[in-house]
Image (cartoon, coloured by chain):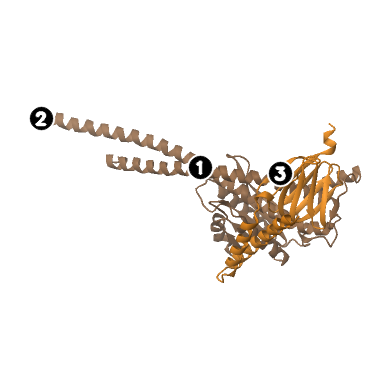
């Protein structure tokens, strides 16, 4: 049995923990609102560029001269994995889920004899992957979403860097792994291949259009190739941008939920401890009384 | 719905936000190969956009709304037209004096020797944008 003082100290300790977790929950909630707004604001652009990509790609004849971002390098040897996680922990299974998916992906790729390179956006992913795959990490970017929301310039330089590496032939396939934001309660980790641009989705549309005949042939200004050459890197940037925004909103949502649970658990713990404390106090009083009474009887 | 034949949906979006979305009568877009006008029923067209001004008329004879874009793409199809700008703002927000000041400040910062390469690049980009804006503003004054 713990002494009364020990109980008091523990109750005080849990109370201050609860204060911290509830403060963190509040902060996460307000940050979530901002992050969600930012993610929603980016939606129309992402949608528009996706639509445009679909239409342009459907009209383009694919040949050996097509941009590499569209058709790939013709090889499937080196994979670049861009893992988007949070910089900080204390957000439930948020980082863990994405990292677990990344680890699975890396293992299956290496088993199939592919070479893997990793680029981490967010500190948590790096910390975990560093243990096992430290030599595969080519770059780590942190502090991408700071106080003022997302750091566009930093993100832009990351995108440029990845494209540059692709041009230099450092990798053949690039996939993003990030937490997709569905709602405040659900974020699911997702793998999305971004280089080469996955055509599969649009092949069906193309077939449908072919049957209908050239109903809406697009004119390109300046030329198809030039447009595609500009559009593809832009589209890649938007995909990365969307992933980071989703992840930023998801992080805050996950933290809010985790901290809400922690606050509730702390409340339960406090009432449990208080109950035990009172019981202990009463038994101390009882035993003191017994001592006094039995002392008096003995006289 | 006779109105639908003369107006169409126009959208101006940048990665940060949607700036403009409504039914309009005519739009003039600064394409890479020259300005082009779009009205309802325009042939499908995909064009890249140079830095400049997008002009939007909501009705014939109305005063155009002018918006500055720093390049991007225009996507025109039968019923709608979308301009995907890298950055965009209303022309009325631009001011020649503040822009000149901004350019001077940026040049001063660039002159500092202790800059890292990415910081320098960032400043250069800002400078390019500011210069393009200034060109637009001073170009307007001459007209």
| A35 vs A281: above or below | below
Separation of marks 2 and 3 at Cα, in angstroms:
95 Å
Question: In which image quadrant can residue A295 be found?
Answer: top left
* Image height of A217 relative to A298, above or below: below
Marks 2 and 1, Cα distance to the nearest angstrom?
A: 59 Å
State the brown chain: A
Q: Is residue B78 visible?
A: yes
Q: Crowding near pointer 1: few (<14 within 10 Å), some, many (20+)?
A: many
Per the image, the residue denoted by label 1 is: A258
Q: Which residue is mark 3?
A: B20
Marks 1 and 3 sit apart, C-alpha to C-alpha, by 38 Å
Q: How many labels, in total?
A: 3
The residue nearer to you, when weighing B84 against A274, is B84
Q: Indicate the colour of chain B.
A: orange
Is A135 located above or below residue A221 in the figure? Answer: below
Work out whether disc 1 and disc 3 sit on a shared chain: no
Q: Nearer the viewer, mark 1 or mark 3?
A: 3
Can the viewer see residue A116 in this picture? no
Quarter of the figure with the C terminus of chain A: top left
Residue at horizontal 24 percent and vertical 34 percent from the top: A284
Q: Earlier in the sequence, mark 2 or mark 1?
A: 1
Residue labelled with disc 2: A298
Indicate whether B1 appears above or below A115.
above
Using the image, name the chain to which the residue with label 2 belongs: A
């Amino acid at each position: 049995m713990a002494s009364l003082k020990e109980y008091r100290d523990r109750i005080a300790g849990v109370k201050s923990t609860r204060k911290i977790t509830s403060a963190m929950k509040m902060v996460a909630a307000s940050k979530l609102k901002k992050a969600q707004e930012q993610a929603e604001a980016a939606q129309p652009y992402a949608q528009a560029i996706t639509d445009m990509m679909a239409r342009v790609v459907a009209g383009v004849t694919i040949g050996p001269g097509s941009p590499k971002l569209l058709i790939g390098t013709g090889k499937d040897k080196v994979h670049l994995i861009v893992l988007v996680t949070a910089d900080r922990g204390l957000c439930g299974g948020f980082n863990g889920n994405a990292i677990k998916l990344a680890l699975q992906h890396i293992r299956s790729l290496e088993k199939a004899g592919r070479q893997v390179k990793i680029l981490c956006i967010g500190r948590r992913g790096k910390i975990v992957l560093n243990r096992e795959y430290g030599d595969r990490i080519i770059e780590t970017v942190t502090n991408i979403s700071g106080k003022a929301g997302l750091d566009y310039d930093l993100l832009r330089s990351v995108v440029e860097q990845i494209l540059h590496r692709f041009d230099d032939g450092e990798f053949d396939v690039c996939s993003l792994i990030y937490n997709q934001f569905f709602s405040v309660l659900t974020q699911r980790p997702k793998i999305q291949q971004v280089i080469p641009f996955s055509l599969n989705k649009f092949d069906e549309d193309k077939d449908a259009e072919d049957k209908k005949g050239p109903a809406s042939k697009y004119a390109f200004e300046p030329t198809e190739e030039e447009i595609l050459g500009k559009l593809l890197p832009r589209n890649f940037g938007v995909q990365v941008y969307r992933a980071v925004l989703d992840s930023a909103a998801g992080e805050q949502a996950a933290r809010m939920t985790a901290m809400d649970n922690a606050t509730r658990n702390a409340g339960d713990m406090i009432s449990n401890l208080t109950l035990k404390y009172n019981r202990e106090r009463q038994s101390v009083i009882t035993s003191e009384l017994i001592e006094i009474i039995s002392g008096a009887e003995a006289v | 719905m006779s109105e639908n034949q003369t107006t169409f949906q126009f959208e101006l979006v940048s990665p940060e936000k949607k700036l403009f979305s409504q039914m309009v009568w005519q739009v003039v877009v600064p394409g890479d190969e020259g300005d082009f006008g779009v009205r309802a029923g325009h042939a499908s067209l995909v064009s890249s956009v140079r830095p400049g001004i997008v002009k939007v008329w909501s009705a014939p004879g109305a005063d155009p709304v002018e918006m500055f874009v720093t390049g991007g793409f225009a996507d025109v199809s039968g019923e709608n037209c979308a301009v995907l700008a890298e950055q965009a703002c209303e022309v009325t927000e631009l001011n020649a004096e503040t822009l000149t000041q901004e350019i001077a400040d940026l040049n001063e910062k660039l002159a500092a020797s202790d800059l890292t390469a990415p910081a320098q690049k960032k400043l250069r980009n800002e400078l390019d944008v500011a210069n393009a804006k200034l060109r637009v503003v001073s170009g307007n004054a001459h007209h």
